[in-house]
Image (tube, rainbow, N blue to C red):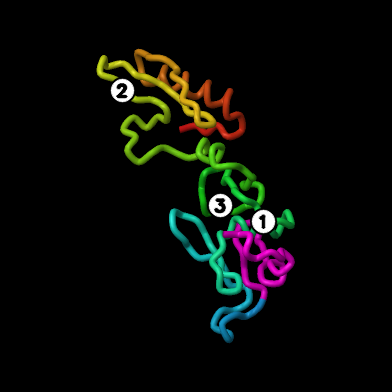
Amino acid sequence: MTQQVADTSLLHDLFEYNPLDGKLYWKTDRANGKIKAGSCACMKAAKGYLCVFIQGKKKKAHHVVWAMHKGYWPKKLDHIDGIRAHNFIGNLRETNDLLNAANRGLNKNNSLGMRGVHKISSGKYRSCITYQGVKYNLGVHNTPELAKAAYDAASLKLRKEYHREC
């Protein structure tokens, strides 16, 4: 998606980046004056992301912010805080699919509110973690809190800065 606009210098001609809100603003009037210079260029896109249009092509705003600051287009970016609309340059990091998945939040069908923990038929709680495509069983525990502690310890050890409290 982002490799199509090769020249990152064009971005600086089009947008002003605001470090206080992490958003992009138009530098000049657009659409025959219907969109004024200084107005926010970001629009809400699917799944909580923000996007902008460049030469008629939709681009993820966080990729544009990265390209403006780093001078190249990233292949994959992660929002460190997990909030997809927070496009502060300090909240973005390059990643791959596996590490990006490690930083996601809880699944919608998670009934315990704890990542990597599920109740088994004995009434106890199993914890497990998947890291780089390998699933690790972290044991069976008497309480969900103990299972979560096992998960958090493994996540911190394996994922390091990609560990996320859930």
Q: Nearer the viewer, residue 152 or 8?
A: 8
Residue pictured at 42% horizontal, 17% vertical: 146
Spot occupied by residue 121 in the image (x, y as percentages of width and height): 25, 18
- The image quarter containing residue 2 is bottom right
Residue pictured at 65% horizontal, 58% vertical: 65
- Judged left or right of residue 120, residue 150 is right
First-in-chain label (3 vs 2): 3
Which of the two marks, 3 or 2, is nearer to us in this view?
2
- The image quarter containing residue 109 is top left
Secondary structure found at label 3:
loop
Contact (CB < 8 A) between labels 3 and 2? no
Q: Nearer the viewer, residue 94 or 166?
A: 94
The residue under label 2 is 119
Q: Is residue 6 magenta?
A: yes
Count of number-bearing discs: 3
Which of the two marks, 3 or 1, is nearer to us in this view?
1
The residue under label 3 is 86
First-in-chain label (1 vs 2): 1
Q: CA distance from mark 3 to mark 2?
A: 34 Å
Spot occupied by residue 10 in the image (x, y as percentages of width and height): 71, 69
Q: CA distance from mark 3 to mark 1?
A: 18 Å
The residue under label 1 is 73
Q: Please say if 146 is above or below 101.
A: above
Q: Is residue 51 magenta?
A: no
Q: CA distance from mark 1 to mark 2?
A: 43 Å
- The image quarter containing residue 132 is top right
- What's drawn in magenta, residue-wise? 1-27
- Kind of residue indicated by mark 2: Lys
Number of the label disc, if any, that sits on residue 149: none
